[in-house]
Image: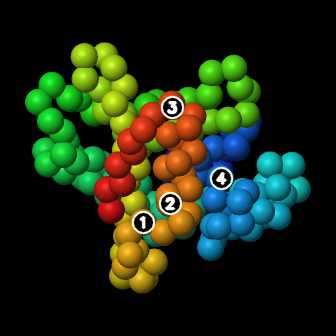
Amino acid sequence: MTDAAQERQSILPGLGASEIAAAAGLDPFRSPLQLWLEHTEQCEPFAGNEFTDWGLEVEQAILRAYEKTRLEQGEMLMRPSESIYKPGSTWKRCTPDGLVYAEQKLLRSVQVKNVGHRMMHRWFEGPPDYVVCQIQWELWILDLDRGDVMA
């Protein structure tokens, strides 16, 4: 198992943005039951595969492209090193791929998706519901009005 897969395998307390679509029954890759079994330690969580490992590798390049093409004067992209919990909560969390700041004010979140030929059909009309759900959870956690998706 790769380091990235080991990192993904550890379940943090609470419900993260990447899990909210499964909890809502919108994730085509994980059911609400599967999520519950993982969180109650009745089965092993998804440990990643070749596609998810490549996605993590490509994510860095996509974020660099986002910095070059989408940031405005005075904006800076930061990568959170850990999950962010909704103030006053011990279970509502997210870990955005990037956060955009200007003058120390958080402006928006950034979520990166490496969409290959096997997944393109899900993106023909924009980000699929499970991605929109993830972004909406992040926006709620962070109290933001805008989240960007780079795919």
Query: Is residue 61 found left or right of 52 in the rendered image?
Result: left
Depicted 77 relative to depicted 117: above or below? above
Q: Alpha-carbon distance for marks 2 and 4?
A: 10 Å
Query: Is residue 139 found left or right of 42 in the rendered image?
Result: left
**Residue 6 visible, this orientation:** no
Residue 20: mark in rendering = 4
Q: Which residue is mark 2?
A: 131
In the image, farthest residue toward the top: 104
Q: Alpha-carbon distance for marks 3 and 2?
A: 17 Å
Circle 2/circle 1 CB separation < 8 Å: yes
Label 3 sits on a secondary structure element that is helix
User: In percent of the image, x 20 and y 29: which residue is there?
Assistant: 75
- Disc with the residue nearer the chain's start (4 vs 3): 4
Q: Residues within 10 Å of mark 3 (few under 14, many from 20)?
A: many
User: In percent of the image, x 56 and y 56: which residue is there?
Assistant: 133
At which x and y percent is residue 9?
65, 50
What's under tag 2, amino acid-wise?
A: Val
- Disc with the residue nearer the chain's start (2 vs 4): 4
Q: Which of the image's four quarters has the C terminus?
A: bottom left
What's under tag 1, amino acid-wise?
A: Pro
Circle 4/circle 3 CB separation < 8 Å: no
